[in-house]
Amino acid sequence: MKCENREEKISLYIDRQLDWQEQKEFLKHIKQCPECKQALQQAQQLRQMLLDMPQEEVPEGLHENIMKAIQKEMQKEAQKTSKKASNKTIIKRKKVWHQYGVLAASFLILAAGVSLYKKNNSINMDNTAMQLSGDILVGEGAILADMDELGEVGEVGEVEEIEEQNNEPFQQQPNITQSRTVKNPETSKALPQTPYIASSEPETQKTEGAETTQSEGAEEAIQGEQNDQNSEQKQETQKVLTQSASETKNDIESDIADDLQDNGEIKSEHQKSTNNMRAVPSNMKSKSLQITLKANNADKILKNIEKRVKALGGEVETADAQNSITVKVPLSEYNNVSNWIEQQGEVIDKQEFTEDLAKQYKEIQKQQYDASEKEKEAEQKQQPRKAQEARKIQKECQNALDELKKTAEFATITAIFSE
Amino acid sequence: MEDKKEDKKEQPVWLKAALQNDSTAWDTLVSENERFVYHIAYRMMQNEEEAKDISQEIFLKVYRNLSKFDEKSAFSTWLYRIAVNTCIDALRKKKGKQTISLEEQFQSDTQIQDTKESPEYQYLQKEKSMYIMQTIEKLSPEHRAILLLRDMEDMSYGEIAECLSVSLGTVKSRIARAREQFKKEFLNKKELFIKKKRQTSVKGNKGGDNV
């Protein structure tokens, strides 16, 4: 053996990684070569020295700090799951919209989430809630990005990028820009914090403005939480958007002209068109309840809730977070179930939300109507692509309406137990 | 289904409960593993404060990703992997930023510690540890990690390969290179130190150059 690769051979020899033949050669060489012999001795000493390094004492309080951090994370997660559950119906609808780029409606629905979200905040967190959820997002993003490097899967890490890319089609798609600007103020009107009160309130411009900005901030927070669920569909959205953007490239100029015109008229048109449309089904309200109970035997109660809900034709949405459960029950059984849950422990907090879906329903109907008008117009102008696009939107609107109807048939109950 | 089971390794008893967010299980998980997590963190980061923060970060990562743990490797290997990678990332980010020099740390440590060993012996031991730590500090995060796993934690080549997600061949050559680098730096350091000792008093309350 020659002295080249000395360190590697020595290293492998020390760790018994040489095969029998190599080892024999190595030892033979060592006997003849003082340099290599010295190097081997040094290497052995250094390894021994490293092995002998005294173990550091774990600093006091480390265990407690780690446990605190984990518990904090568990709480965040529990709150998140309960929030997600109450927003789930909204997400579902959002999916449909996202896929076809009818963002006006999705914005509306998001804002609906905001009103829910705001209420959730009052139960779960203090004013820093939005900041907190921001932290969660940032934290997770970083973590997953890190995990990505570890060779684990990190879906969330991609979201930011996708969102950024999404901005482009937003600007290219005149339809969307138009809808956003027009629908924005409408949103806060359509989704008051407490539907009953708001409907009797006069519609003042000032409050509307204030609510809109607020809801935009909260929208970000909510989107943050839904990121992991939405990342996939966002990708799809992006695809669709880019596709349609390139498809309609030729038509864009005329589109812009059309839209500018529409933009000015849309408010009055909206009033007209809603009158023309079919009636909204009765009872278009989604009910949800979040209840926090103090009980000693949470596990048992959770199981009982599950049993009871299933027996009544409902379903368990999430039961993964510790000491909390989210269920869906047919609307007719809502009072029955919620009263029963209340009797299972000492009620610490109870929040009932009713989301008025009627206005959302109307909004979507309006979109559908607008799309049908567009279709007619496009057919007159012999623009088959635009007509097809409009038909697509109409179909999706119909799906969204069906979803809404389904949502109104079930109530969501989230029960959280503390000991 | 059964094939999948065969792939899976036996896991600690508390794992299932930990996946259900059971607090007691998490307490056990942390108790059983905090020592070596801190150990890795300390030796990689070379500083107590950072080691504490990183240890916490590592356990949070474990918490957030436990559901992704496929149980095909031992839990400890998975945990090692997260720990080492978290430290490597932190070191990369830290690169260029100044921190408390080991020597300062060493000085304060020697003053506080008080055991039954003779002060001279203690001092020498500390001095040796500081040497080693300072030498390790000179290595790249990857070399640092592999030396730590092999020569301090005494992990097998196979375990290291699994933990760092690299091939056995890479482990072999990387260990050799890390050791070579370590030896070179260590000998340099020794020379410098001897020179310095000649210049300053051995009592050396302020023996080090303050970085």
Image (spheres, rainbow, N blue to C red):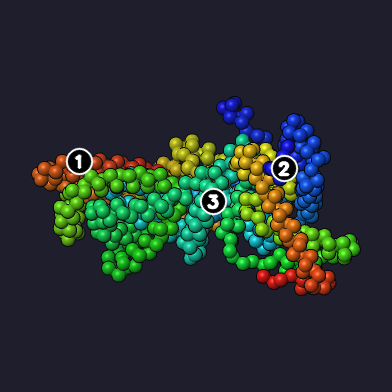
* Nearer to us in this view, A209 or B71: B71
Which residue lies under the disc numbered 2? A3
Q: Are marks 1 and 2 on the same chain?
A: yes
Name the chain letter of the residue that bears numbered label 3.
A
Q: Nearer the viewer, mark 1 or mark 2?
A: 2
Residue A411 in the image: state x and y as whole percent. 42, 46
Amino acid on which disc 1 is placed: Gln
Q: Is residue A370 left or right of residue B151?
A: left
**Tag 2 subunit:** A
Circle 1 SS class: helix
- Callout 1 and callout 3 share a chain: yes
Nearer the camera: disc 1 or disc 3: 3
Q: Position of residue B109 (x, y in %)?
A: 77, 66
Residue lying at 69% horizontally and 72% vertically, measured from the top left: B210
Q: In which quadrant is the N terminus of chain A drawn? A: top right
Residue B76 visible in the displayed image? no
Q: The numbered mark 1 sits on a residue in which chain?
A: A
- Where is mark 3, residue-wise? A146
User: Residue B164's mark?
Assistant: none
Residue type indicated by callout 3: Asp
Q: Could you tell which of marks 1 and 3 lies nearer the N-terminus? A: 3
